[in-house]
Image: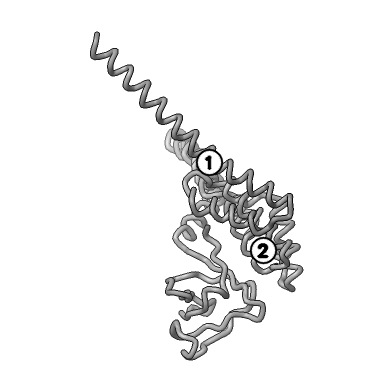
């Protein structure tokens, strides 16, 4: 009896400590965020920016998902107020990766792109419409959709195995089509999960060199607003894969990292 009482007491203490630690972890970033919001409303943009950047760098496990996307959105608003439209495009694009259906972020992104002379992110054609439709889900959401899409297929296969017949075969074909359609967002998110991207924010485009040196051969110029895959990081330089498939180096200041 005594040992069970002690075990129960230790468990209560451990749970209390865990809850207290979690509460402290949550309260700390909330305090920093409140300070940043107050500074932003007071017009102290430099303080607001430094606090939100501190929040992103210091609390990657606590500030995540949609909440992290909101902080990225706020940094985009800061850049927009500072007339750094290309940087704002980067922040909004990064935010949409975490909050892909947020209407305010989409609206501000299109406004920022318009200010830089870039084409709209969503031009309204079939290609962009489908890309926005299938990309409107986070990785977790797309996984749930894929599992739900597989359920009718499992039921149809079971029905076909038990009853057979033409109707059962048609049911299997329809369920297979729906499962394939529902798996597209998840497959797309898996393919891009390990891909780190950068956005070119140099107004006149970024010079791409064969080596991470200013005097190295210039192999191409990547236009402003182009999204490239980042392959490696070197002091003040980034190795990227161009749309042509070739690899090159551009200055770190000419690109904005989208994975934050």
Looking at this view, is 116 or 18 the one in front?
Answer: 18
**What is the spatial separation of the Cα atoms under label 1 and label 2, in whole angstroms?**
27 Å
Would you say 153 lies left or right of 82 here?
left
Mark 1: give few (<14), some (14-19) or many (20+) Cα within 10 Å: few
Residue at the (44%, 36%) spot, across then down:
158
For disc 1, the marked residue is: 28
Q: Is residue 254 visible?
A: yes
Looking at this view, is 170 or 14 the one in front?
Answer: 14
Looking at this view, is 180 or 145 the one in front?
Answer: 145
Provide the secondary structure element on which disc 2 rests.
helix
For disc 2, the marked residue is: 88
Would you say 182 lies left or right of 106 here?
left
Mark 2: give few (<14), some (14-19) or many (20+) Cα within 10 Å: many
Looking at this view, is 137 or 232 the one in front?
Answer: 232
Would you say 104 lies left or right of 260 here?
right
- In this rendering, the answer to whether 127 lies above or below 100 is below
Provide the secondary structure element on which disc 1 rests.
helix
How many marks on residues? Answer: 2
Residue 226 x, y percent position in the rendering: 61, 73
Residue 116 x, y percent position in the rendering: 73, 72
Q: Can residue 169 be seen in this view?
A: no
Q: Which of marks 1 and 2 is nearer the N terminus?
A: 1
- In this rendering, the answer to whether 258 lies above or below 62 is below
Foreground tag (1 vs 2)? 1
């Amino acid at each position: 009896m005594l040992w069970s009482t002690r075990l129960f007491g230790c468990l209560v203490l451990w749970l209390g400590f865990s809850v207290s630690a979690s509460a402290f972890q949550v309260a700390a970033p909330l305090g920093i965020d409140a300070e940043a919001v107050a500074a932003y409303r007071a017009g102290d943009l430099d303080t607001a920016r430094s606090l939100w950047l501190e929040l992103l760098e210091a609390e990657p496990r606590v500030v995540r998902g949609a909440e992290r996307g909101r902080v990225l959105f706020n940094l985009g608003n800061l850049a927009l107020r500072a007339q750094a439209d290309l940087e704002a495009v980067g922040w909004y694009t990064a935010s949409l990766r975490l909050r892909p259906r947020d209407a305010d972020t989409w609206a501000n992104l299109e406004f920022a792109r318009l200010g830089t002379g870039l084409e709209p992110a969503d031009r309204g054609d079939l290609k962009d419409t489908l890309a926005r439709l299938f990309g409107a889900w986070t990785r977790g959401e797309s996984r749930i959709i894929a599992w739900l899409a597989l359920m009718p297929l499992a039921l149809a296969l079971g029905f076909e195995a038990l009853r057979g017949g033409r109707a059962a075969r048609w049911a299997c074909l329809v369920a297979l089509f729906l499962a394939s359609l529902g798996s597209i967002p998840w497959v797309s998110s898996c393919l891009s999960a390990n891909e780190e991207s950068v956005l070119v924010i140099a107004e006149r485009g970024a010079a791409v060199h064969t080596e991470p040196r200013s005097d190295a051969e210039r192999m191409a110029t990547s236009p402003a607003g182009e999204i490239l895959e980042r392959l490696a990081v070197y002091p003040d330089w980034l190795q990227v894969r161009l749309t042509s498939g070739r690899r090159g180096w551009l200055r770190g200041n000419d690109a904005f990292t989208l994975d934050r």
